[in-house]
Structures are given as C-alpha cells and as structure tokens.
Image (spheres, rainbow, N blue to C red):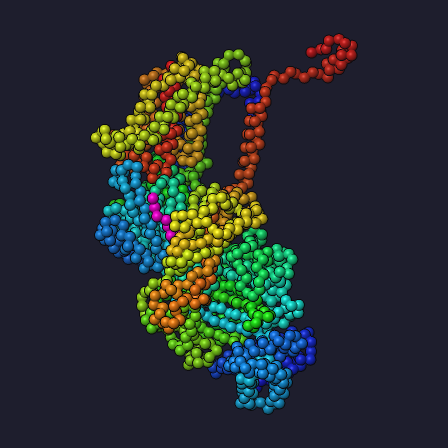
Amino acid sequence: MGLLSDPNRRRALTNLLTRLNAPICVVCYLAGVMWFMGLAFEPFTLRTYMSENAMGSTMVEEHFPAGERALATGREFAAHKKKVGGMPVNWLVKTMESRGLEVFTQSFTRKLPFPDENKERYLVRGTNVYGILRAPRASRTEALVLTAPCSQGNANNQAVGLLLGLAQYFRSQVYWAKDIIFLVNEHDLIGMQAWLEGYHHTNTTGGDWSPLHGRGGSIQASLSLELSSDVITSLDLVLEGLNGQLPNLDLANLFHAFCQKIGVLCTIQGKLQRNDWESTSGYSHSAQTMMLMVLKQASGRPWGDHGLFLRYHIEAATIRGINSFRQYKTDTTTIGRLLEGMYRKLNNLLERLHQSYFFYLMPSLTRFVSIGYYMPAFGLLAVILLLRALDLWVQLGASAPGTEDGLAEREQSPSSPGVLSILTPVVISHMTGVALYCLPVMSQEMAVQHFPVSETEAVVLTAIAIYTAGLALPHNTHRLLQGEGTEHGWRVLKLVALLYLAVLLGCTALINFSLGFILALSLVPIAAFITPHTHKPLSAAIMVLLSPGCTLLYCVLIFQELQETPVSLQDGWMLFLSVISQGILDHSLYGSLVYPLLALLIYPCWLLLWNILFWK
Amino acid sequence: MAAFRSNIFMLAFFLCGFSVFVTGDVQTNQMNVAETVFIDNVPTTETDASPPSVTEQSQTAEEKRLWEGTEVGTNLADGASDNKVDHVHDTMQATDAPPSPPAKDQTQRFAFDERIWEATNVEINLVEDAPPIRDKEADEADHVLDTMQTQDFPPPSTAKDQFQEELVIKPLHSGDIYASFQFRTQWDTDFLLGSKVSHYRLFPKSLGQVISKFSVRELHISFTQGYWRTMQWGQPFLPSPPGAELWVWFQDTVTDVDLAWKELTNVLSGIFCASLNFIDSTNTVQPSASFKPLGVGNVTDQRFLRYAVLPREIVCTENLTPWKKLLPCGSKAGLAVLMKSEKLFHSSFHSQALHIRPVCKDWQCKSTSWELRQTLNVVFDLHTSGQGKREWSLFKMFSRTLTEACPLASSSKVYVDITDNPQGELFELSPATPLVSQAVVLGDGRTYSVYDLTDHATFGQTHSLNVLLRWRAAESGEMLRPLLHGERYVAGYGLQTGEIHTLVYNNHPYRAFPVLLLDTVPWYLRLYIHTLTVTSKGRDNKPSYIHYQPSKDRLQPHLLEMLIQLPPNSVTEVTVQFERALLKWTEYTPDPNHGFYVGSSVISALVPSVVAMDTNNTQERPLFSSFFPCKEESTYFMRIYTEPLLVNLPTPDFSMPYNVICLTCTVVAVGYGSLYNLLTRTFQVEEPSQGLAKRLANIIRRLRGVPLLT
C-alpha cells in the first residue's frame, strides 16, 4: 500500500499494468484454465477423510437379513401400483401401520406453468405417504429421513420394497435416538417439494399442499433411494442439489466407507474410480468425472430427490442402484445392510454434519478438491476483468485534459458525456432481460393460438426469439440524446460493464462455483477484448458464439459427450430446447435460480458488451 | 428365631418406655434402634426357608408405628388436644373398622386415656415374657398386640406417617403397556408453626430439611426421558414434559424468593444427581395462571412461584437411584423391587416425578400435613421386545415378580385396567382376582382388577405374584381420540428468522372449552410479538387473556400465557415469528451445531367429560345414575405438554476460530486501513525540509528585517 501512496511509484505501476495489460490478461486466462484442469490431477487433490468423530471411529454392525422379503414387498407394491394406476395410498398406509409406524399422508396439487413434455405432466395431483418410526425415549426433536420415489411404470419398486423392509427391521431395534421418517413420494420432485414445504410450513413456489400432521423435529440428514432391479452391480452417489448446493462431504465419505466395508462397487457421476493416475487415460478419466460434476452443479437443478432437502440445511444424497453387464452382482440384502449401517452412523450423530466441507469438487469418490484449491482458478479469470477495468480507468484519466494527476477532474469526466448515454443501454439491456424472463411463460397462450406449436415449444421458442431479438435492438439510442457517440462514451460503458460482470460472476461463483466458472470462461474473453474498433463481422460472430445461450448449447453437448452418450447436432439442438424448458420449469417449481440469473443479469450484461461492439 | 425377634422388641419397647422420660436429644439414638429392628427383621424372614408371613411383616410395622406414636405423642402431649383426637380417629378409620358416629366421642376419649396405659402395659408384658421364651408364646404375644391395636385401640399417636404404594398397569391401544407406580408418604408434621423437627420416620429427611430450610410450600419435580404420545397412548395419569421440570411455590414468608430458588435448585441438583443447577434466571419464569397450587392454602400470588424446564436433561439410572432411596422401603421390598433400571430404561417412555404438597390432616382441615408423592411412569414397547408375541407379565416387564408388600405400607395394591376387556375377550389376565375397583380417571370411567399385596392370599402357592396378560384378539380396537392434543414445530428455513407454530386440537365433537397456553422461549429467539396470531377454523381467535413478559438479553426468557377458547372439533394454530440471535462466542454450548432447545409449551385445560359421548355407557350402569353428568365427571383438569423444539442458531465455524480471527483482523487492519487512507488523502509533492543552519539563518534574517531565505 505504501507503493500506492507514493505517486511516482504508483505511476510506474500503472504504466506497467497498462503497457503489459493484454499479455497479463492472456496469461491469467490460460493459467486459470490450466489450474482448473490441474484440479483433476490426483497429486494435486486431497484424499477424503471422515471429519465427524461421531461417525468415524464408532463401530456399527449390520444385520439386515430380509432382502428377499423386501423384494417380495416391492413386487406386491408394484402389483398394487398397477391396479390403482398410481400411488397405492391405502396399501402403503396399511403396510406401514402393520410395521409399527405412525403413518400420515399428504395430498398436493400443482399446476405447472406449461406442460412438461419430458415427463408428460401438466396438472399434477398426488399423495405422499410417510411413516414415522418413533425412537424410544426420544423427545421428537431430531429425525432422519429415508425416501423412495413412487415413479411411473416399473421403476423404483424395489426401492419402495427395500424401504418398507428397512422400516420393519428398524422398528424392532432399540438403539434409535432419532425418529426415522420413511417417505414414499409421488411425482418425484414435485411430491418432495410439497412434503418439504409442508414439513417446514413454507410456501416458496406457490404450490397447493395439505398440511402435515406428524413431524419428528428437525431433520438431520436424508437419503433418497432409487433402485429398479433386484440385483445391482454398483451404487451411484448423487450429490448435486438445487442451485448447485452440495451436502456435507462427510455424507459422501460415509457412503464410501460403507461401500468399502460391505464390498459394494460405488461410483460417482457413474464413473468408477481408477488407480492409474499417472497415465493419460487415468487423468482424463478423473477430469471427465470432475467435469461432469461441474456441469451438473452449474445446471442448478436437483439431480435426485435429495436435491430439495439442501435448502433446509438438511444433508442429503441420492443413492442410485445401477445394473450393468458386470459379472459381480450385489443383492438387496447387502444394500439393506449398507443403508442400515449408514443410518446407524447417522443416528450416532450428536450435531448436524458440519465438520467437513460444504464446497468441493470430486474427481473421484476418494479424492476431493476443496474451495481453497478451486477458487484460484476462478480468481485468475476474474482478475482479468479487474485488470481491464483498471486499464480503462487509467486511459479515461489520461485522456481527460487538464491536470497532471486528474483525480479531481476524473470525477467529472464520466458525467461529461452524460449519465444518460450509459444509463440508456443499461436500462434497455435490462428491459430485454426482463422480457426474456417474463414473456415466454406469459405469452404462451397467444403463441399457441397463432402458431402451430405446443405450449412447451411456444415457451422455448419465444425465449429464443426474445434472446435473438435482443441482438437487433437499436444500440445507438444514446445518439438520439447526445448526438455522436464519443470515444469516451464507450469506454465508460465498458468500464461499467466490466465491473458489473466482475461483481456478478464473483457472487455467482461464491454460491455456485461451477456456474460462475463456466460463465467466466465464456464471458471474460469477450468482455476483456471487445471494442468498437475491431473487425465487426468477425467480432460479432465470436460474441454470438460465446454468448450465454451458445454456452448452454456447448454444455449440453459436452455433457452428453462425457456421459458417453454422444448426440448428433440435430439431437443436441432438441436437447438444448428441452433443457431450456426444464430450466424454466425448475425455476417455477423448485425455485432454481439459474434461469433468472441468466435472463435478468447475465444476458443484459452480455448485451452491454454487444452494445459496445456496435458503438458509433 | 422368634425368640431373637421378641428380644429385640423388648429392647425397643423398653427404650420406648424410657423415652417418655427423656428429652429430644435421645431421639436420634432411638431412631437408629428402630431401624435396627426393621433391618434385622427383614433378613430374618428371608433366611427363613418358610414363606414370609404377611401378618408378621405388617405386625412389625405396626409395632414400630406404635412405638413411634407413643413417643411423639408424649412430646406433643401438651399441644392442641383437639387435633390429636381427630387424628386418632382418622387413623382408626384408616386401620380397620370405623366406629359408629354416636360412639365417636367416647371412643376417642377412651383411646386417648388408654394410650399411656397401653405403652406401659406392653412394656410390662414383654418384660414378663422375656426370660423363658417359646415360639408359641411369642407368637401369642404378637397376636395379642396385633388384635389390641386393630380392634380395640387406635394407634396412640398424633404423628402417624402413612405410606401407600400402588402400581397401575394399563394395556394401551397401541399394544404397548403403561405401568405407573405411585408412592404416597404422608407426614403429619407442621413444622411451620415453629416447632423444630429433627425426627423423621417414613418421610425422607433430605426432603424434609429442604422443605423447612427453603420454606417451600409445594414442590413438583419431574424427570422424563421421551415424549408421551398422546395420540397413541391416550392421557397419562401425571403428565410431564421431556427433560426436567421443576416448579415450586414458596411460603409467603420468604423475602428473597430468587435467592431461595437458586439455592433450592442447587440442593435439588445434588439430591437427584441432575443438572438442575443449570436453572437460572434465563430459564425461570413466574406463570400467572398456568400453575396453581395443588395443595391446601389460598396464596396464589405468582411472586412465590417459580417454574423452570430443562428440555435437554437426560434422565438415566443416576437419577433413578436417589429417587428410589427416598422410598421408605428403598428398593428392598414392596413394589419398588420391580424398579430395576436395566428394564425401566429399556422402554419407550420413562418419567419419574416427585410432588410435595400440604394436604389436610383431617376433614376439618384445621392443620395440614405433608404429602410426598413419588410417581414413576413407564411405557414398555411390545413391538421391540415382544418378538411378535403379544404377551406380557410382570416378570417380562421388570424381570422380577412381587413377593411382598412394603412392610411399612398401609396399602399396597396392583391395579390392572380391564375396562376394554369386560368379558376377557381382548386379553386374558392371570392369576384372576376377585377384587374389582371402579374409578373415574380423566373423565372416563375405568374398571380395574385389584391385587392387594397386603393380603397373603394374593401371592398364592408360589409365594410370588406375576401378573400375566395374554392377548387373544389381534387388534386392540379403536381408542377414543384424546379430546385435547397439542403439537409444536418450527417453520421456515435459513438461520435468520423462523416461526413457531403451536397446534392445539380440540377433538370434542360439540363442546368448546378454554385452554391456558404457556410458552417459555429463551431470549436468543427474539419473538416478534406483533406477529402473534391465533386462528381456529380459518378465523382469527382472539385470546381472552394474554400475559406477556418480554425477554431481556441474557437475563430472562419470554413468557407468553394465553387463555384461548377452542371451538369444538377444531385445530387452533398459534404462530409467532422470531429472529435468531447471534450469541457471543463464549455463550455457545460445546455442541452448537446440535441446536438449542426450547422447552415444551404447557396446555392446561378443564376438559368436558366424554360421559355423554360414550354410547354404550348405559349398559354398564344403572340408568338413574347417568342422565345428568355428575359434577366430578362433567369436566376434568388436564395438562398436556408439546414437544420441545430444537432450533439451530447461526454458528461460527469453531473449528478454526484462531485462523478466522487472525485473517479478519489482518484484512481489516491492512486492507481497509490503507485503502481508506489512499482514498481520503490528497497527495502533494513534498518540499524538502529546511536544514538547521538555514532555519537559524532565517531567524536572524527575520530579526534583521531582511527577506528570508527559501
């Protein structure tokens, strides 16, 4: 700081920064990307370890014997499900009651803003059934939750069977210190949202649900079970929740520890762990796993039924049974034992899970990257914006006539071309953003009347139309007010845009690193090097290719590629459209913030940059 | 053996006779002797291979009482004779055949006159009997004593401590078993009148001293592990909240109630091995209406009341042991032998309580005596330990059977609730008992099979009583929904604000009734009292009485008391929002991420009885008795407790406080300081400072009036 308070040295420093600004920015960008890719390299990551003492050293034994019976119950459930044509509420209530639980039901209705074509639903009506196993001599202050969704078709019957089997077995045990809630939710996330909002008596998304009558106090942890076959080859752990929230790392550690103990293959992002980190393929394997996690987290949507619990500060994860073509199969009894062990350990918890990390990336199930290691990657990208802003600031000061130092004069200089000339593009961009946020859903009926499309298509296509229309907006409104746009004007506008973007990305990265990083990756280069004096068509093409919409398309394609289900461009486009509709639905159903963030803040910011390109 | 015993009796009676002439100093000695009598006696009967004789046992007790009575009676001989006479009469009724009313006065006088005679007579008797003792003679002597006492003369005492014990077993509709022990000790001493009491018989000395030292008028303390599930189990006989609850009425002579309360909690903490010393001003309140005295007396000034709950208190064997020691027989004999902690704590619910209150000594209620009630309620889970078999017995529940009553008990009974099982179609009870008792419990007429442990025949051939319940029907039938029921939970998410919801259910189909709701909330949940809403059936329900005492940070909790009218068949929802305070870093508990407890709400109500709702009531009773609901059945008092709450407060990461503090301080000091400096200062190129020589030269030049050097 002493460096800055000396005017001479300060001048030298700023000279250096302005002179070498472009190279420094390029180096920072490359370093950021390199750093990020290096995170997947095993020697740079930390090994996971159990931080919570209550779960670490204590021994539990698993005795769950009744896997076959659980499967039989699952088949019975399937039969009743088929007979009723939905959730067999009465049968579930009776079965849970016979297992000694206190059973309650909750009905809910939800009208989606527009039909969901992926899951073919519009007006959703359903019932959640849950049974509470009351812990002896506990005063209803703490609870654990085990959920299994009642899905359509033949999926997840085994999960419900195992849930009921575990309920029966848990009921006969004496060691419970926390109530255990066994929940079968209908319509997956919508039912889960209704149940959680009912449990916490909140209503964030305007759903219609009946109040709950049985509670077990504050929920400490939750596991969601998805199991669609009698035997499985591996268990997949899903962590990514709403808005990119993750459960405490100890929950993942717990799962991994029990998989090791019982001898079940476990995966994360559907990828097994490999031990050959020295080889290129080993590295690319873990890089792929981490990239998948980053993409899933950036999407901001809940990737399993557990995802909605995280908002309530309940550590939750989904355990998904996978049946592939491996030789080695695991039966239901073993999965039951695994869950029993996990619940016994969770039952031992004295405090909420808080010891381990909440912000992490996992290149494999035994390795993790903590926030302290991945944030520099983002920081290196974000510093580019600040450097460019500094450069502009200095240029603005230097170009102002008069004083040597220019500090006092600079106060006036931005206002000299008029606040209006900056305010106009800012306001217009944000109005476009608001239109992008509101109009697709609001104008769907009109669109359906005038065009031969379904509601969902109408919403998505309206969104794309508004997005593209934003590019064609009159970008030179300032000329109407001020006459000729000045050299000074675009610099001030760019300075504002740069700082705005820096703040925006910084905040996003703090909440959801992956989203912030991906956006920074695409937006920082154009924000850094855009001027009105570049080659217009080429710059415009680059800008469009790096716009948030296109970034989303690339993400979809990369995601499919990483999941080893590559799609053609045609299918990719269809997928892109459905992702947009899902994003809008996630926002209105569960309160996911990615769509409003993109529409209301990121897109206007990009429009500002677009504005600069066409500055006259 | 009998010879040995009568020797000891002789010794006792000799001392007793002697004690007439000595002063109170010797009394402690005597008590020791009395204890020897008793303690020696018990092993005697046990080492005897022969079955313990009930008559002998009770006779021992009677002897002891007789002896005590004489002594104290003499001490107080110059006291109010009125009292004494009444008192004697009372005992007579209690012991056996009551005399007919016209003969009352005569009998009393007779008894009074005979007292001295009896004492001496007995003494002589025994002295005569002493040298050549044969078993038969001794027995005869005992017998004589026995008959003398029960038939002709009431025990010649004024201070007649009494002890009763009972166990109620109730099969619950959920299939669980509810066992409720009650031990009642009555202490006929009124030390508040000024007399100093240092002699204790059945009443535990530790508690007696506490009462007298702190001028306690009423004391209620309960330790509960678990939550009473009203919807599954119905109403408990004595409700209690999870954790520890303590409420005390002090005498109106106490000047500094807070000090007395503080000392009392610390003393009780020691007596019961509990963390009652954590009761301080931050969790103590003075409810204005919810807790009225249960004993005699008309002081209802809330200044003398203190109420505190520790929801976090864990109850275990270390609390049970001191509690058991307060019983006259300890856990050596009587019903208390069943209280083995390994079984009591292998249950769904465990609650032990202790209530001390003044009760009327006689029907005129001119003077009071102290009543100590010790209760222990346990619910056994059929599901976990039954292994699918629905069968219960005393042995299965407690891993003990009953072999005798407490020799000091005037009544010792086991009740089994058979209301739902009039024809024995639901379960089978063995051994069968002819005794049946009917009582109205919580507005519901109940029928009980009674086993009288003082009756030798109860134990039968095996000399032990093992009540066995064997279910016949698979389902227990529908339970009458509890008329009053409460729930509580915290709504909302995030660590800034929240909302406490209290739901009060009135399940009565057509009667509205008022309830008193008491909420105590710790100061670190800052209640927004303007957000308090009470709604029933979707409409605003204005409480007719609200007593609110705002909290003071780190000093006193919120107290909210409301009288709410509950419409019939409704759910009334009371909501209030709160903000979570950020505590000082030393104020967090060692496990801050566990959360902080908020004690149960207390809902007290006079609930209309269900007599008119009961449709098949007329089948069991005569018609004339059941048309108008009679007074004691028309309403009954009920108190229920909601769940305690566990609330998370914003918690700093304690795992690295040092790092955090250092980092924050550095950032603030270096970063902010210099940036602020940079922004507020204007920079100018500084001129080089003048040398000393030049300054001197300038001074000279100024003196000379020559232009200065620059």
Magenta stretch: helix, strand or loop mostly = loop
Closer to us: B691 or A176: A176
Numbered marks: total: 0
Instruction: Determine the residue positioned at 24% across, 53% down.
Output: A80
**In magenta segment, residue A577:** no
- Eyeballing the image, is A385 above or below A87? above
Instruction: Determine the residue positioned at 48% across, 19% down.
Output: A393
Report the side of B101 relative to A24 (left or right): right
Q: Quadrant of the N terminus of chain B?
A: bottom right
Instruction: Give percent across and percent down for residue A121.
Output: 26, 41
In terms of image quadrants, where is residue A10?
top right
The residue lying furthest to the right in this view is: B704
In terms of image quadrants, where is residue B114?
bottom right
Instruction: Give percent across and percent down for residue B211.
Output: 60, 64
Closer to us: A320 or B404: B404
Q: Is residue B595 visible?
A: yes
Instruction: Determine the residue positioned at 42% across, 47% down.
Output: B540
Closer to us: B545 or B686: B545
Instruction: Give percent across and percent down for residue B104.
Output: 56, 81
Q: Is residue A264 visible?
A: no
Q: Quadrant of the C terminus of chain B?
A: top right
Instruction: Determine the residue positioned at 56% across, 32% down.
Output: B668
**In magenta segment, residue A210:** yes
In terms of image quadrants, where is residue B393?
bottom left
Instruction: Give the residues drawn in magenta, as a range.
Output: A208-217
The residue lying furthest to the top in this view is: B706
Instruction: Give percent across and percent down for residue A139.
Output: 45, 56
